Amino acid sequence: MCYGKCARCIGQSLVGLAILCIVANILLYFPNGETKYASEEHLSKFVWFFSGIIGGGLLIFLPAFVFIGLEQEDCCGCCGHDNCGKRCAMLSSVLASLIGIAGSGYCVIVAALGLAAGPLCLDSSNQWNYTFLDTEGQYLLDKSTWSQCIEPRHVVEWNVSLFSILLALGGIEFILCLIQVINGMLGGICGYCCTHHQQYDC
């Protein structure tokens, strides 16, 4: 098995997922494409936690690029062992994976809290409130209650869709980083540079 190629595939997947997380988080600031709610701070507090931009985005780019670069690492050798450099690189990817796990975990937790709390919206009493905060997320199953949010229009659908996307993307990132922890440990323990192209085998 080529652990370097596996890591590269995981890294490339993470780059795409991180970009999607950033886009989804940015869209949360503009319900229905309007900018006034962000400037007036009439957005859910969980939008301002930057879970998709930082957690599922920037903190994922770091391990992603580390994983992508593993296959090109040179076997510099150490202590008389030609494959030592590659083994160390694979083991170091485990540390990068932990950063990815932390970032994606943060993204998942904030997205879940955002879904549970519901959006900040103008209700029938002309007050900006978390209308569904006391429902413990049950509003998600009862679309007939979504009309309680008067402004921004369709903000419930907007928040539910984008926070759900962040939850799913963050979950996938978490799983991929967890896989790389195992892949990196296996590559570091039993991997070696078996060809000129830096492939691994046990």
Image: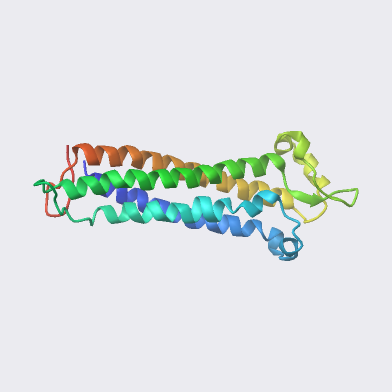
105 with respect to 184 (left or right): right
Indicate the position of residue 121 as horizontal and vertical percent values: 79, 51
Q: Position of residue 151 (x, y in %)?
A: 80, 55
Asked whether, in this view, residue 58 is left or right of residue 82, the answer is right
Applied colour scheme: rainbow
**Nearer-the-camera pick, 119 or 100:** 100
Q: To which quarter of the image does residue 25 belong?
A: bottom right
| Residue shown at the point (68%, 52%) measured from the top left | 158
Quadrant into which the C terminus falls: top left
Furthest-front residue in this view: 79
Between 125 and 77, the one lying in front of the other is 77
Q: Position of residue 84 (x, y in %)?
A: 16, 46
Q: In the rendered view, does 117 fall on the left or right side of 15?
A: right
Residue at position x 19%, y 50% in the image: 85
- Left or right of residue 201: residue 185: right
Which residue occupies 20% across, 49% down? 86
